[in-house]
Every structure is written in C-alpha cells, then in structure tokens.
Amino acid sequence: MTRSMALLLTEGAVADITKGGDYKLFGFYVQTPLTWGLHVRNDVEKFQSTDDLKNATFGISRFTSGSHLMSYVMASQKG
C-alpha cells in the first residue's frame, strides 16, 4: 500500500531531501526539542493545509513509535 503523507521528525527528512528524496516538507506540527513535521510526496497536490488531512492515511515508522503516537495526538486535536 502506498502512503501519500507521513508524520516524522524533520531532521531526518531534511537530510534525505538533500540527498534527492522525492518529497517535500508540508508543514510543522509540534515545536519541541524534536520538531515533528508533515511531509508529502512532491506529486501530491491535494494537501494544501492540515484541514485537507481529514480521512488521510498516515505513514508511521513502526507501531508504538513517536510518529504513531503523534498521528493520534494530531487526529485528536484536529478532529
């Protein structure tokens, strides 16, 4: 199954983008010592704001990970 969007730590994503990763930083979600960002593939036009994420499928690194937890936190806050 292909995912269109992921919630992950920004530092690793930026490092991969500089090496040619084919996605873009969509927006920042939480400002903490670990900055979480929303990232989408470059060819995905349907996400223009966080409001567009309703019913979207989130990609996570693994169950019980930070990205798994933060996707639930965001869903709870955004509805």
Image (spheres, rainbow, N blue to C red):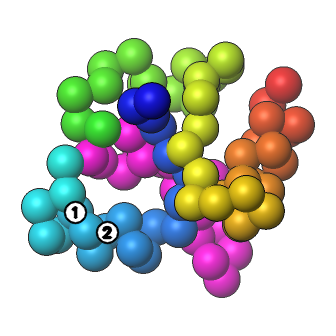
The answer, for residue 47, to whether it is visible in the render is yes
Q: Which residue extends farthest left?
A: 20
Question: Along the horizontal axis of the image, is 18 left or right of 78?
Answer: left
Q: Which residue is depicted at the point 73% across and 57% down?
A: 63
Label disc, if present, on residue 14 of the rendered structure: 2
* Residue 33 against residue 20 in the figure, above or below: below
Q: Which residue is depicted at the point 31% across and 25% down?
A: 44
* Residue 41 against residue 65 in the figure, above or below: above
- The answer to the question of whether label 1 and label 2 lie on touching residues, with beta carbons closer than 8 A, is yes
The answer, for residue 28, to whether it is visible in the render is no
Q: Residues within 10 Å of mark 2 (few under 14, many from 20)?
A: some
Q: Which residue is mark 1?
A: 17
- The N terminus, quarter of image: top left
The x, y position of residue 39, in whole percent, is 43, 47
Q: Is residue 32 magenta?
A: yes
Q: Which residues are magenta?
A: 23-40
Question: Along the horizontal axis of the image, is 56 left or right of 76?
Answer: left
Q: Quadrant of residue 18?
A: bottom left
Q: Which residue extends farthest right?
A: 76
The x, y position of residue 54, in whole percent, is 67, 19
Looking at the rendered structure, the number of numbered marks drawn on it comes to: 2
Q: Label 1 sits on what residue type?
A: Ile
Q: Which residue is depicted at the point 72% across and 46% down?
A: 71
Q: Which residue is depicted at the point 44% across and 24% down?
A: 47
Label disc, if present, on residue 45 of the rendered structure: none
Circle 1 sits in a helix, a strand or a loop, which is it? helix
Q: Label 2 sits on what residue type?
A: Val
